[in-house]
Each structure stands twice: as structure tokens, then as C-alpha cells.
């Protein structure tokens, strides 16, 4: 198996059974923390923080544009509150989705809110990558469960049942 860099990331000793699902920016390096895993985590942390900082600068320019346009304090406060609330909701939604599979229907309904609250999403990615690859815990749990199920089914099979001798009745 290979990740997006083209390097082989198949864990040693895994010839059959379930395969780990690749994560964005990490491929399957999250499984055994090889292939530059720590460097990738640092890059994701710094990249998300840098993107959030640049995004805040752009929002600051938009705020100054509202002041120059003379829209009034109501509109200015409304825009600030909208971005703050949407960013907080986007952070919470993104953070929760790292620990469970998101409902596609709910994600479709929240698409606009997540787009407006993009700063919260970036901050969630940055905060999660400080401790693990974002989504690693969910994928590890699913992989371990699938691996245990595979091992359990493999241990029950001892050979080809068609070749087994028939037992004689006494």
C-alpha cells in the first residue's frame, strides 16, 4: 500500500485482512507513526494556524471595508457576531467529526455555516494535530475493530471444510 507520497506504508506482518483507511495529509502513516508522521503533524498544525491568521487578516480588511462604507454599527456588529458564532459552531462540528463518522445529510445542511466559519475549522485542525492526526482516533478504533473481527473469523477456520473426513456414525 502507498500513501500520497508514493512510499510503501503497509504495516509489517499484515498480509491479509482489513487495510487502514488513509487520512488527509497523512496517508496510512498514522497506523505506525512512520514515514514522517511527526513532521506531517507539525506541518498541519503550523499550516492551519497560518491559514487561520491570514483568514483573520482578510476578515479584518472586510471589517474595515464596512467601516469605510458607513453601513452603521448594527450591520458591523451583525457581521462580527455572525463570523464569531459560525466559527464557534464550525470548530465544534469539526472537532466532533474527528471522533465519529459525520452524517452526510447533516453535513450538507451545515455546508454554508461551515463555509462562513472556516476560521473555526482551521483552528480545530490545528488544535487536534497537536495531539494526533485529525481523525486518527476514529480510524484507529475502526481499524482495530475490523482487525479483531478478521482475526476472530480467521481463527475459526482451520482448513478447507470440503477436505474434512466425514465422521462415521456408530
Image (tube, rainbow, N blue to C red):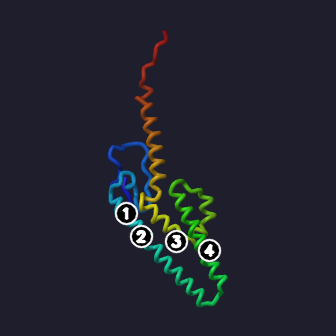
Q: CA distance from mark 3 to mark 2?
A: 13 Å
Q: Which residue is disc 1 drawn over?
A: 40
The location of residue 70, given as percent across then percent down, is 63, 90
Task: Using the image as rendered, state which of residue 32 and residue 82 is in the foreground.
Answer: 82
How many residues crowd around disc 3 within 10 Å: few (fewer than 14), some, or many (20 or more)? many
For residue 47, the mark is 2
Q: Is residue 75 above or below residue 42?
A: below
Is label 1 or label 4 in front? 4
The location of residue 113, given as percent across then percent down, is 60, 69
How many residues crowd around disc 4 within 10 Å: few (fewer than 14), some, or many (20 or more)? some
Task: Using the image as rendered, state which of residue 150 and residue 163 is in the foreground.
Answer: 150
Residue drawn 43% across the image and 73% down it: 50
Quarter of the image where one finds residue 108? bottom right
Residue drawn 61% across the image and 65% down it: 110
Task: Using the image as rendered, state which of residue 2 and residue 101 is in the foreground.
Answer: 101
| Apparent side of residue 18 relative to residue 109 in the rendered image (left or right) | left
Q: Are marks 3 and 4 in contact (CB under 8 Å)?
A: no
Secondary structure type for disc 2: helix
Q: Which residue is disc 3 drawn over?
A: 119
Secondary structure type for disc 3: helix
Residue drawn 48% across the image and 9% down it: 170
Q: CA distance from mark 1 to mark 2?
A: 10 Å
Q: CA distance from mark 1 to mark 4?
A: 33 Å
Q: CA distance from mark 3 to mark 1?
A: 21 Å
| Apparent side of residue 11 relative to residue 127 in the rendered image (left or right) | left
**Nearer the N terminus, badge 1 or badge 4?**
1
| Apparent side of residue 33 relative to residue 84 in the rendered image (left or right) | left
How many residues crowd around disc 2 within 10 Å: few (fewer than 14), some, or many (20 or more)? some
Q: Which residue is disc 4 drawn over?
A: 82
Amino acid at each position: 500500500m502507498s500513501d500520497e507520497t508514493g512510499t510503501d506504508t503497509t504495516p509489517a506482518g499484515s498480509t491479509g485482512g482489513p487495510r487502514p483507511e488513509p487520512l488527509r495529509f497523512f496517508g496510512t502513516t498514522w497506523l505506525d507513526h512512520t514515514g514522517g508522521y511527526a513532521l506531517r503533524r507539525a506541518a498541519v498544525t503550523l499550516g492551519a494556524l497560518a491559514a487561520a491568521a491570514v483568514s483573520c487578516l482578510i476578515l479584518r480588511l472586510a471589517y474595515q471595508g464596512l467601516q469605510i462604507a458607513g453601513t452603521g454599527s448594527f450591520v458591523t456588529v451583525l457581521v462580527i457576531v455572525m463570523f464569531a458564532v459560525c466559527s464557534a459552531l464550525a470548530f465544534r462540528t469539526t472537532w466532533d467529526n474527528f471522533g465519529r463518522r459525520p452524517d452526510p445529510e447533516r453535513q450538507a445542511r451545515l455546508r454554508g455555516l461551515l463555509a462562513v466559519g472556516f476560521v473555526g475549522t482551521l483552528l480545530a485542525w490545528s488544535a487536534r494535530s497537536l495531539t494526533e492526526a485529525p481523525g486518527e482516533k476514529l480510524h484507529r478504533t475502526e481499524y482495530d475493530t475490523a482487525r479483531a473481527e478478521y482475526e476472530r473469523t480467521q481463527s475459526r477456520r482451520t482448513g478447507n471444510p470440503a477436505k474434512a473426513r466425514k465422521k462415521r456414525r456408530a
